[in-house]
Image (tube, helix red, strand yellow):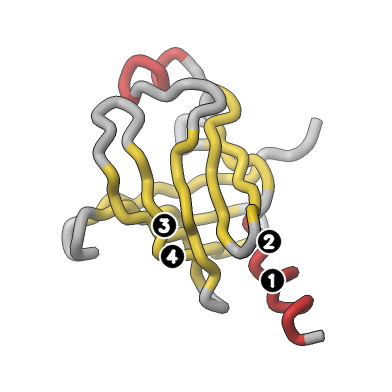
Amino acid sequence: MLGAKADQSADRIIGRWQFPSKGSSVDIYRKGNLYFARVAEVDQAGEQNFGLMKDSLLIRDLRFDGEVWSGGRLIHPKTGMSLNAEVQMFRPQVINVTIYKGIKLLHRKFIMTRQEKQ
């Protein structure tokens, strides 16, 4: 029963999340014990500035450790560069995504909000 409870806790991240600009979003889903983020919606700025393309895989291989989803890789859509990715949930509607290369000292954070089903 403990495993089922842990799965439910880890699955809180599943859903559609909007980027800070609110024009582009990703769908976070689970496959096995790993979590992935696929681009769901792209606005013009997201396409021009970051090279986002609808349905492209953005983050792969996140693992839930009981507190955060870590160990993932973000594939930068424009450069193809692979970066470390970590996700922390502050509230059911807010996640903080941290992207870094190698060490967390040099990182970029952005807050994403859950998009309500329409």
Closer to the camera in the image, 3 or 14: 3
How far, Cα to Cα, is label 1 from label 2?
6 Å
Q: Residues within 10 Å of mark 3 (few under 14, many from 20)?
A: many
Taking the image as shown, residue 59 lies to the left or right of residue 50, namely: right
The disc, 3 or 1, on the residue closer to the chain's N-terminal end is: 1
How far, Cα to Cα, is label 4 from label 2?
15 Å
The disc, 2 or 3, on the residue closer to the chain's N-terminal end is: 2
Taking the image as shown, residue 110 lies to the left or right of residue 7, namely: left
Residue drawn at (74%, 69%), measured in percent from left and top? 8
How far, Cα to Cα, is label 4 from label 1?
15 Å
Q: Secondary structure at mark 2?
A: helix
The residue identified by callout 2 is 12
Q: Report which quarter residue 35 is drawn in.
A: bottom right
Q: Residues within 10 Å of mark 2 (few under 14, many from 20)?
A: few
The percent coordinates of residue 94 (x first, y second) are 57, 54
Amino acid type at image mark 2: Arg
| Residue 70: mark | 4
Q: Is residue 75 above or below residue 93?
A: above
The percent coordinates of residue 6 (x first, y second) are 69, 77
